[in-house]
Each structure stands twice: as structure tokens, then as C-alpha cells.
Image: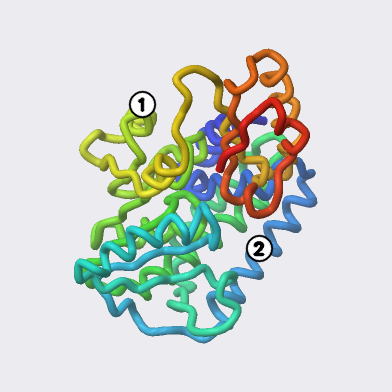
Amino acid sequence: MSYCTFFNQLLATYGETAAKSRLEIYFLSHGRGRFAQAVRGLAALARDCYFLFCLPKGEVASGNAVAVVTLAGANGWKVLQEPVRIAQDNGLHIDIVWHPRLKKTGTIFGRPDLSAFIDVWKDIRQIIGRKVPGLSRVLVITCLMRHVLWKSAWRKFLGTTHSILILHNDFDMMSRAAVEACRGNGTSICIQHGIPTDEFFPSNANYQIVWGQSSRVVFEKSGLIGSSIIEDSFGRRKLQSTFSLPPEGICLVSQTHTPVYGIDLRSNFLKLAEEIADNTPNGSFRILLHPEEVRHGHPYIQLEQRATLQN
């Protein structure tokens, strides 16, 4: 089932509350039977309970802005580094909050309030009475419970003062809960971290910083109001300084390092690259490598005579 079809079914069957955890539910359910989904859902709930109840707790946010980091790599902290530095250079005091799995020790923010489950009980009862084919209701319920815990923890951490959230995505479990906890008492700003695909939408943050006009068009077509979109190019500036496109030819933008929900992309990308190389003149085909492919390897070595490899 495609992600878009899955999201529409989830929304139609269980409503917006369940759809808030759409990415987590899809990731944990994709390619697995209902029993395996239930086990993974319960394990993830137990892990988050450990993170939020058992690890040492910190104080409330001390700065006037919070950077939310749920990933350490090119789709996470590296996206936030430059805008956070710029904001700090301009006098903004930013608390950097890492997902607990990224910081094995140290202080973890906020302790959830279990009374928050009262608000979600009616949604859980709705889930028990309905089902999506192939999807475990136990998984959906555990994701709802996790979302409530994260949101409560964020409310404790953010307190009642106006906060600015800076995020590299607004749809994973921790980030979505942060956006909701901040809503009405703060401003959330999400910085584009890659080509906008289905999981980016619907957008949740108050503002989206996008790479340029083409990305703006995609966000607007997906329902985001134009005034909520800010064009900047934290990532694109670096790409533009790395290479120049030929006047004619084909460029293959590669990301074989990223398995999409367990699917290895290397063989598919290599097959596509071989077909392009076979049908284009020498020197007119370039393969643009993702930085992770430059560091950890790629499948295109045998094509070096027929294609230009660039990072």
C-alpha cells in the first residue's frame, strides 16, 4: 500500500487524532503482519515510557527558542546547524533538545502527566470498534498513547512562556508533539530537509522554510498558505557551490544510502543509471551523489567511464 493511500485510509477510519502519528504507524506496520505490528507498537511504547519516566528530568526551557533534534545525520541536526548558528549570532538564546535515543546519558526534558490520557480515551474506543485491513489496532492505540506522552512532556518543558520551535521536520512523533504543545503559545518553524514527498504533508508547523520556488509550489499545491512559506536555501547554497550543470544532459540525483521502509534502493538506482548511460553520449550523464554515499560508498563504480560522479 502506498503511503498516500495508507494515510487517507487511516484518516477516514480513525480520524485526525490517529493521523497525527501517521508516519510512525506506517513505518512500524509496513511489510509486517498484525501480530508483528502489535509487538513493535508495544515495544516502542515501553521504550518511550522509559525515556520519559525513568531518565533524569530537566528544568523548563530557559531560552526564548528551542531546536528539536530527532535525527543526528543529514536529515536532522545537520539541517539545523546553520540556522541555529545564525540565530545564536543574532542574540537568540536557543535550547537544543535531542531525542533521548541520541543522548544515552544526561538530562531529559519534561515528565508526562498521565491524566493526559483522559483526553484520548474516546479516540481509543473508536479504534477498538473499527479496523483498517492489514493494520493492527494495538499498534494504532500504542502510537496514540505515545503521542499523548510526548505532548505532555513538551508542555511541561515549554511552560507558559512564548517559545519559538525550530525543527527539521514536523511529522515524526517527537516533532509533531512539540508543534502541538507549542500551538497557541508559541511559533513553530520547520526547515526543509529534502525533496518534499508525501510524508511532508499535511504540514503542521506555523512556517515552512523551503529551498526555493519549486519547493514553494509543491507546498502550496499541498494546501499550505503562501504566507506561511519562507524561501531560503540553507541546503541549496551548499549544493550550488559544489557543481555546475552542463548546458545539455541528464543528472541522476542519487540517495541509495536511504532504505525506504526496509527497501534497498542500490540495485534499482544502479539499473536506472546503466540504462541512462547506455542511451546518452559520453560526458552528458552525471550522477549527483548524496554526501552519505560519498562517505560510505555507492554502487556506481563500474559506470565511472560512462558517467561523471559528483557530490
Q: Nearer the viewer, residue 223 or 49?
A: 223
Picture coordinates of residue 84 (x, y %)?
A: 33, 63
Local crowd size for mark 2, using a 10 Å CA cut-off: few (<14), some (14–19), many (≥20): some
Point out which mark residue 194 bears.
none
- Would you identify the image quadrant in which residue 82 lies? bottom left
Residue bearing the label numbered 2 = 44
Measuring 57% from the left and 70% from the top, which residue is drawn there? 102
Residue bearing the label numbered 1 = 221
Q: Mark 1 to mark 2: distance in Å?
A: 34 Å
Question: What's the residue type where badge 1 is placed?
Answer: Lys
Of the two numbered discs 1 and 2 in the rendering, the one whose residue sits closer to the viewer: 1
Q: Quadrant of the N terminus?
A: top right
Q: Is residue 121 visible?
A: no
Q: Nearer the viewer, residue 181 or 76?
A: 76
Picture coordinates of residue 227 (x, y %)?
A: 21, 38
Measuring 45% from the left and 74% from the top, which residue is drawn there? 113
- Would you identify the image quadrant in which residue 279 lies? top right
Question: Judging from the image, what secondary structure is the residue with disc 1 in?
Answer: helix
Q: Is residue 10 visible?
A: yes
Question: Judging from the image, what secondary structure is the residue with disc 2 in?
Answer: helix
Colour convention of the picture: rainbow
Earlier along the polypeptide chain: callout 1 or callout 2?
2
Picture coordinates of residue 22 (x, y %)?
A: 54, 45
Measuring 49% from the left and 73% from the top, which residue is drawn there? 114
Q: Quadrant of the C terminus?
A: top right
Q: State whether residue 63 is above or below residue 22.
A: below
Q: Nearer the viewer, residue 183 or 277?
A: 277
Q: Nearer the viewer, residue 173 or 76?
A: 76
**Left or right: 230 with respect to 149?**
left
Local crowd size for mark 1, using a 10 Å CA cut-off: few (<14), some (14–19), many (≥20): few
Question: What's the residue type where badge 2 is placed?
Answer: Ala
Q: State whether residue 30 is above or below residue 217.
A: below
